[in-house]
Image: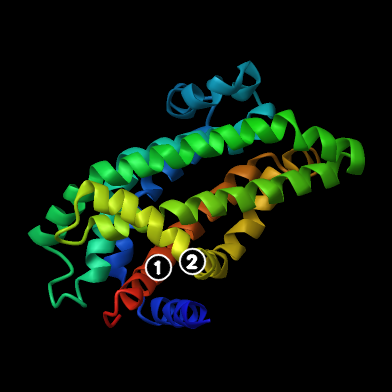
């Protein structure tokens, strides 16, 4: 119960103490994401095809033709997003965390020290993210091979898709919790690669329920928008305008930058409280 009270307090403090300087590293992830979605709306142009077509074509020839390209857009965006977070996020997330921790350490939020701590955390954050994505890919393949077929037989089309999507979300959150504390620990002085990776996973397992509460508290609005795109994209394409999918993905991407900031901010505070330090 103590950890749950601390989690609620951490959620409140993260929301109350929002700072643009801490959030900005997450916002930089938006640049390539929104550019990709803009190019996806311009596939009829050479630069649109060059900017988004390369990714969409990995999902088949239908991925580069109107309007079927918008049916594939969510999957293509997820693939690109994984690459962006692996390459850029593995530095930008620790940079944001170093800035979040700076007031507690009585250090400036910007400057060489925060950059140094972020650079030191890059490798272990990247490894944790790659493992995270690998596990999710494996789970997705298992869902397609088994549960989706079972749900389709029992529930029918839309209900089966919704239940499968919800199951996938639960698994994604579970895996995300396991690796959440790796970069939080990695930016701390004195933490080795092994301390950050192994210690971060162990801390997540000990604080699993409170950390999951933090993630759900901030994530649910973005999930509602994402569900519109991922559960029944054909409905948006056939009954509304296909371009609506790109717009909803852009809204989700913007929301997720704030969601990620608040999750890491609250989880950092919970981490400090577990270690007996004031937040």
Which comes sooner in the sequence, label 1 or label 2?
2
12, 225: nearer the viewer: 12
* Image height of 183 relative to 83, above or below: below
* Image height of 141 relative to 237, above or below: above
* Local crowd size for mark 2, using a 10 Å CA cut-off: few (<14), some (14–19), many (≥20): many
Q: Mark 1: which secondary structure?
A: helix
x and y percentages locating residue 34 in the rendered image: 45, 45
**Left or right of 76 on screen, residue 146:** right
Mark 1 in CB contact with mark 2 (< 8 angstroms) = yes
Q: From the image, which quarter does the C terminus lie in?
A: bottom left
Question: Which scheme is used to colour this image of the protein?
Answer: rainbow
Q: Label 1 to label 2, Cα distance in Å?
A: 7 Å
The residue at 60%/64% (across/down) is 221
Dot label at residue 216: none
The residue at 55%/54% (across/down) is 173
2, 269: nearer the viewer: 2
* Quadrant in the rendering for residue 190: bottom left
**Left or right of 39 on screen, residue 22:** left
Q: Mark 1 highlights which residue?
A: 267
Residue 41 visible within the image: no
Residue 74 visible within the image: yes
Q: Mark 2 highlights which residue?
A: 211
x and y percentages locating residue 112 in the rendered image: 8, 58
149, 230: nearer the viewer: 149
* Quadrant in the rendering for residue 117: bottom left
* Image height of 95 relative to 55, above or below: below
Q: Mark 2: which secondary structure?
A: helix
x and y percentages locating residue 164 in the rendered image: 74, 44
* Local crowd size for mark 1, using a 10 Å CA cut-off: few (<14), some (14–19), many (≥20): many
* Quadrant in the rendering for residue 235: top right
The residue at 63%/30% (across/down) is 141
């Amino acid at each position: 119960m103590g950890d749950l009270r601390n989690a609620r307090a951490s959620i409140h403090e993260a929301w109350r103490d929002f700072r643009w300087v801490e959030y900005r590293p997450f916002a930089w992830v938006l640049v390539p994401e929104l550019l990709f979605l803009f190019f996806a709306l311009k596939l009829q142009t050479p630069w649109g095809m060059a900017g988004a077509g390369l990714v969409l074509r990995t999902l088949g020839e239908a991925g580069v033709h109107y309007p079927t390209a918008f049916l594939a857009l969510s999957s293509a965006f997820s693939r690109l997003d994984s690459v962006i977070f692996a390459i850029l996020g593995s530095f930008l997330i620790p940079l944001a965390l170093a800035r979040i921790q700076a007031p507690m350490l009585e250090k400036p939020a910007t400057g060489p020290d925060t950059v140094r701590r972020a650079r030191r955390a890059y490798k272990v954050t990247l490894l944790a993210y790659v493992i995270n994505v690998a596990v999710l890919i494996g789970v997705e393949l298992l869902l397609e091979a088994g549960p989706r077929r079972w749900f389709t037989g029992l529930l029918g089309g839309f209900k089966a898709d919704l239940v499968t999507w919800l199951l996938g979300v639960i698994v994604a959150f579970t895996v995300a919790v396991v690796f959440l504390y790796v970069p939080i620990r990695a930016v701390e002085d004195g933490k080795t690669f092994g301390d950050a990776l192994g210690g971060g996973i162990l801390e997540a397992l000990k604080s699993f329920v409170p950390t999951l509460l933090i993630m759900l508290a901030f994530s649910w609005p973005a999930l509602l928008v994402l569900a519109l795109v991922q559960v029944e994209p054909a409905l948006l394409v056939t009954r509304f305008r296909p371009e609506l999918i790109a717009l909803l993905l852009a809204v989700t991407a913007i929301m997720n930058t704030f969601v990620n900031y608040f999750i890491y901010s609250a989880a950092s505070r919970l981490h400090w409280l577990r270690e007996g330090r004031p937040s």
